[in-house]
């Protein structure tokens, strides 16, 4: 019995194939991950801007309603 069985070698080979095989799959994956994070952050900041605009509209409408009533 050696230090590595056939299963160990197959698993290591599969990991090496995933990491180093093809045309930089890991770098493509990390690039897509980074784009996803940036898109998520942009979506959060857009949501805050929309909430501020909605709050400004509703407070402005309430102020106008008070002026019309008086």
Image (cartoon, rainbow, N blue to C red):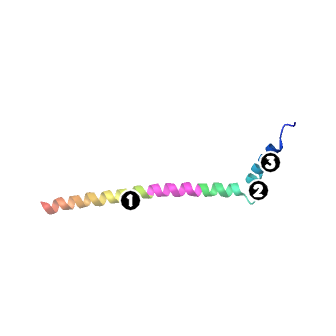
Q: Main secondary structure of the magenta part?
A: helix
Say whether marks 2 and 3 touch (CB < 8 Å): no
Q: CA distance from mark 2 to mark 3?
A: 15 Å
Circle on res. 67 = none
- The structure residue drawn at horizontal position 40% and vertical position 55%, both measured from the top left corner, is 48
- Marks 3 and 1 in Cβ contact (< 8 Å): no
Q: Position of residue 43 (x, y in %)?
A: 47, 58
In the rendered image, residue 54, in percent from the top left (x then y), is placed at: 33, 59
Residue at 73%, 53% in the rendered image: 18
Q: Residue 59's image quarter?
A: bottom left
Q: Give the alpha-carbon distance from disc 3 to disc 1, as whole Å.
A: 53 Å
Residue hosting label 2: 21
Tag shown at residue 10? 3
Q: Quadrant of the N terminus?
A: top right
Q: Quick one: SS at disc 3?
A: helix
Question: Which residue appears at 35% of the width and 56% of the height?
Answer: 52
Magenta residues, start to end: 34-45
Q: Are marks 2 and 1 in contact (CB under 8 Å)?
A: no
Residue lying furthest right in this view?
1
Q: Residue at x 15, y 63 (%)?
A: 68
Which residue is the site of mark 1?
Answer: 50
From the viewer's perspective, tell me whether residue 4 is left or right of residue 70.
right
Please identify the quarter of the rendering in which residue 21 is found.
bottom right
Q: Position of residue 50 (x, y in %)?
A: 38, 59
Which of the two residues, 15 or 61, is positioned nearer the viewer here?
15
44 horizontally vs 19: left or right = left
**Residue 19 among those drawn in magenta:** no
Q: Nearer the viewer, residue 64 or 29?
A: 29
Q: Tell me the CA gap for discs 2 and 1.
A: 45 Å
Q: Nearer the viewer, mark 2 or mark 1?
A: 2
Q: Earlier in the sequence, mark 2 or mark 3?
A: 3
Q: Secondary structure at mark 2?
A: loop
């Amino acid at each position: 019995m050696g230090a590595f069985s056939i299963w160990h070698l197959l698993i290591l080979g599969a990991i090496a194939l995933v990491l180093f095989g093809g045309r930089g799959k890991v770098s493509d994956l990390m690039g897509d991950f980074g784009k996803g994070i940036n898109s998520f952050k942009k979506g959060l900041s857009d949501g805050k801007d929309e909430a501020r605009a909605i709050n400004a509209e509703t407070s402005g409408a309430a102020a106008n309603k008070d002026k019309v009533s008086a």
